[in-house]
Amino acid sequence: MYSSFNWDFWELENSGMISFRDAADPGMRAHKKIDKEPTKLIETFKKYLSHTIEEVQPDRVFIDSMETMFLVIKSHYTLMMCVDDLFDVLRTHDITSVITVGTMFGIDEVVEYGADSVTNLGMVRVGNNLQRSIHVVKIRGSASVNQVRVLQISDNGVSVLTQSPYLEF
């Protein structure tokens, strides 16, 4: 990010504007053994997350990525309960949370069900061109545009176009 956009995350971290936490923290590692019950890993992460939020008192929390934690859970019911429990931890604090989830393992559908807002980012092929796309799947309590929009990332930042430059009529 520093070389592409000149964003100095080290400076932001040193000034207290941003804080990075690793779920591979030594306190979590003890529960990453295969012989442990997967729900115990989730329980440990919830405690770690709650403690970190209380310690840092952030306005926003970003979790990247959620599916790595949930891949070991085979039961959809157990998965839904774990996702709901994690969302409950985030909802009990006065923060905005952003969570990334991939689409490969079907976990995204369970997370989307429990989330208050879902925005999909992707790539769309239009003719011989690939373009980034963005669309709001759901946002509780608000209306949204039900269209896929073009997401452009450039040296000037991120912008959303109302129409594709490659749109074919």
Image (spheres, grey):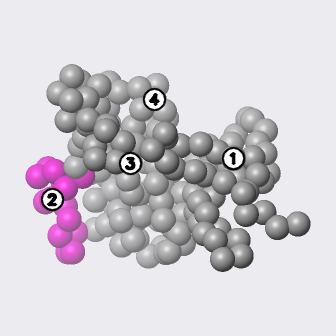
Instruction: Mark 1 or mark 2: name the one nearer the start of the chain.
Output: 2
Question: Label 2 sits on what residue type?
Answer: Arg
Question: Label 4 sits on what residue type?
Answer: Ile
Q: Element at badge 4?
A: loop
Q: Element at badge 2?
A: helix
Q: Element at badge 1?
A: strand
Question: Which circle marks residue 29 in the picture?
Answer: 2
In magenta segment, residue 27: yes
Q: Which residue is mark 1?
A: 161
Q: Which residue is mark 3?
A: 63
Instruction: Mark 2 or mark 3: name the one nearer the start of the chain.
Output: 2
Mark 1 or mark 3: which is in front?
A: 1
Rendered residue at 45%/29% (across/down) = 95
Question: Which circle marks residue 95 in the picture?
Answer: 4
- The quadrant holding residue 139 is top right
Question: Is 74 situated above or below 112?
Answer: below
Alpha-carbon distance for marks 1 and 3?
27 Å
Rendered residue at 54%/63% (across/down) = 108
Q: Residues within 10 Å of mark 4 (few under 14, many from 20)?
A: some
Alpha-carbon distance for marks 3 and 4?
13 Å
Question: Is 139 situated above or below 57?
Answer: below
What residue range appears in magenta? 23-36
Residues 67 and 15: in front is: 15
